Amino acid sequence: MELPFKHQYKTLMCEMTALGVYNVGAQKCVPLHQWGPGVRNHYLIHYIVSGKGVFVAGEKTYHIRAGQAFLALPDTEITYYADEEDPWEYVWVGFAGTDAQPILQCTDFAPNHPVIDPKDGEAFKKAILRIYAARGADFNHAVRMTGELYSALSILMHSRPPRRAEDVASQYVQKAATYVAHHYAYPISIPDIAAYVGVDRSHLYTVFKQVIGVSPKDYLTDFRIRKACALLREPALSVTAVANSVGFENNLYFSKVFRKRMGQTPSDYRRQAGPAKPPSDIMDEFDRL
């Protein structure tokens, strides 16, 4: 009987913005070995080589067997654990970047369908192991790992009909949202976001209103305020430090925006220590894409 093992590599920083590897590895688990509950800040795919286990995403539970793969989405609470009688062995890769969402949309993965049966699971397993073999701390290794990641994800992709106009609009919003997630702490502007997406400011406004019902400016502000709410729970950070950390260079303007959105000042929010909740309406709508 094969003994349990774990081989993994975690990058110190993700230098690739279009697509980059966060971690990669292989593991033979002991019975009932568990990760979670918790959230990741990146996409994470596990392919089951042998054995069985359970994957819990949100309120849904999936019983998974050898030959299947499951996808954990960023900022979604998950738990997964090995079967007691036949614990699984799997390979995995964690990744993020602006290309991640468009590529995953060309696979059978979907937010409400996180478990798939890859047509060529063996090839996908070998591709992940090639990512692990390319590991290293310098930029050359990061590029090689990303190249192998593209190859691995291509195995899961298949032909799709031409995208409808609303699908293209959704892609623009997804790409803009990824840019915001990576750059909200800097003094970025709406023209900066539009330039990154590859459309003019007017068209960016149109697709945001069409897809999630808010303007890009409101989305950026909402994102920053959500991050600020989390940081305000850290007593070591001053309100000024929080403002600077979420892209507001003027502390008074930050306080004004925060009070307008949350109905109270940053200091009052901090003192409440929990009862007030960060804004969720815009972000919840986006999460339903």
Image (cartoon, rainbow, N blue to C red):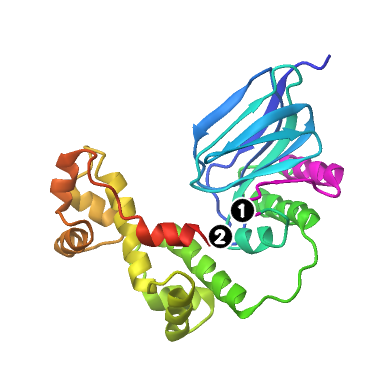
Instruction: Decide which of 113, 71 is in the foreground and name it.
Output: 113
Q: Which residues are magenta?
A: 110-133
Local SS, label 1: strand
Q: Is residue 190 left or right of residue 269?
A: right
Residue located at (37% from left, 74% from top) = 215
Residue 261: % across, % down: 23, 61
Residue 185 visible within the image: no
The residue tagged 2 is: 17
Q: Is residue 97 left or right of residue 27?
A: left
Residue located at (42% from left, 57% from top) = 284
Q: Which mark is residue 20?
A: 1
Residue located at (28% from left, 47% from top) = 277
- Tell me which amino acid carries mark 2: Thr
Instruction: Decide which of 91, 144 is in the foreground and name it.
Output: 91
Q: Residues within 10 Å of mark 2 (few under 14, many from 20)?
A: few
Give the distance between the C-alpha atoms of the residues marked 2 and 1, in whole angstroms: 7 Å
Q: Is residue 96 left or right of residue 133?
A: left
Instruction: Give the quadrant of the N terminus.
Output: top right
